[in-house]
Amino acid sequence: MSTGIIILLCLALFVVIAVQVSKLSQLGSQIRGEEHVEIQNTNRNAWGMLLFGILFLVLCIASAWYYKNYMLGYGPHESASAHGGVLDSMFNLTLLFTGIVFVLTHIALFWFTFKYRYSPTRKANFLSHDNKLEIIWTVVPALVMIVLVIKGLVGWNAVMADVEPDEDYLEIEATGMQFAWLLRYPGADGKLGSKEFTKITSLNPLGQDWTDTKNLDDIQPSEIVLPVGKKVKVRINARDVLHSFDLPHFRVKLDAVPGIPTRFIFTPTVTTEEYREKLSKYPEYQVPSDPNEPDGPQLWETFDYELACAELCGKGHFSMRRLVRVVSEQEYEKWLAEQQPYYMSTIRNSDEDPYKGQLLNVDIKERKEAFEARFKSALESKDASGRIIKLEHVNFETGSARLTADSKYELENVAAMLKANPEIKASLRGHTDNVGDAANNLKLSQERAEAVKNFLMSKGVSSSRLTAKGFGQTQPVDTNDTEEGRANNRRTEIKI
């Protein structure tokens, strides 16, 4: 309470002092004369403006020079893309012309303020018209504009050119939403599948049309990984409000507009590691990345390219940052091989899967690769048990020796591996659970082993290389007290 009273008293005292100073100034003017005071004030303002103008220009130039290494295009931040040099040269040319105008106009502004300050002996000279002056300040800016426009058109045509139909390039997609970038890469087919906004759900944030088979191998990574030296075409979309796809180190920036797909094409030329190495040569990056950890990694060691949203799209705007890595072609292919298609990881066999319960080409391919890996491992095994391969996807109709339709894919893989290794002989082994009569189970397992043998023979495998034997319920590998255990015991094996 007392502090508030003191503040109010101080403000009241300040007002009283200001009023008294004003009265003293008026009395001084009356004593010295109005004109004398006006000349004195004019001179003081003129010298103040001149000094301010000099200080202003010096600080502008000095600060620009001091911070040039943090401004894109200067110091360590040269463009990391093939087209970036074109944009940087346009910026430098524009900066040259506007910089000249900026310096000259400010010199003129502050010098004229000083030179033509009020003086009772100076008379104004009014110029109603000057053709020469009119021509100069019309023609010179027009010529400058012509140069800038031509340079801009050449740059636009170079930067915004589309890819040729037969050109080798990588196409990816970035969709902005509050508050994230949804990224999409094509899978093994190299093509992005179609999508429709009406299909957007919690499981399908991009609205991909799963009946379009090109979507089945598309991936949705959490970061952008690009191969150095390869042209990249980015599809840019927005799901809700206006966003801006900004890769500042590559001079890539384009708005993401709801309902209006756009695209940008660029070629990264500097890997992340090469950019870090370049930064390591500058003193401002040879400092701890975290001031609280002086012995931790330096600033250049923690540098990463980034994708940002250059629009203020809401309070969570900051969270739209995504890491961007530029790597060698070999590193990129390795990374891509490690990614799992979004369909397989999230949609497969869910209620949104139009192929629920069906076997797809991608499933067949994965099963083939898995079997080949198990077969090769069995070939190399020195242990008898290691040479037994369970046929994971060979099944029979209940209580029958009739193979299910999907079993043929696994058995075709078996036939292919046997034909590729003609020196190999194989024993086909059938097993059942303990449900039912033991003798009937033994007979059923023998018939199932014979059915597998007959299928392999129909695919060109010689009968002399194959034997078939049923073991019934005598060799369980799991408990018969649970359904899961019994399912494991009902199996068909091949022993090399």
Image: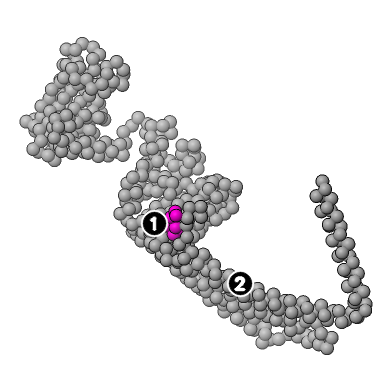
Foreground residue, 7 or 435?
7
For residue 402, side relative to residue 26 (left or right): left
Taking the magenta stretch, the answer to whether it contains residue 297 is yes
For residue 263, side relative to residue 104 (left or right): left
For residue 97, side relative to residue 452 (left or right): right
* Residue in view at x 18 percent, y 39 percent: 376
Which amino acid lies under the numbered mark 1 shown in the image of this protein?
Val
* CA neighbours of label 1 inside 10 A, class few (<14), some (14 to 19), many (20+): many
Label 2 and label 1: CA atoms lie apart by: 36 Å
Which quadrant would residue 370 be assigned to in this image?
Answer: top left
The mark lying in front, picked from 2 and 1, is 2
Which quadrant would residue 163 be assigned to in this image?
Answer: bottom left
The colour scheme used to paint the residues is one colour
* Start-end of magenta stretch: 295-301
Which quadrant would residue 212 be assigned to in this image?
Answer: top left
The spot of residue 159 in percent (x, y) is 45, 64
For residue 160, say whether it is visible: no
* CA neighbours of label 2 inside 10 A, class few (<14), some (14 to 19), many (20+): few
| Residue that mark 2 sits on | 60
- Secondary structure, mark 2, is helix
The spot of residue 174 in percent (x, y) is 46, 50
In the drawing, what numbered circle is on residue 156?
none
| Residue that mark 1 sits on | 326
* Residue in view at x 24 percent, y 17 percent: 433
* Residue in view at x 93 percent, y 79 percent: 31
Which amino acid lies under the numbered mark 2 shown in the image of this protein?
Cys
Taking the magenta stretch, the answer to whether it contains residue 192 is no
Seen as rendered, the residue at the extreme left is 464
- Secondary structure, mark 1, is strand
Image height of 425 relative to 246, above or below: above
Comes first in the chain, label 2 or label 1: 2
For residue 36, side relative to residue 440 (left or right): right
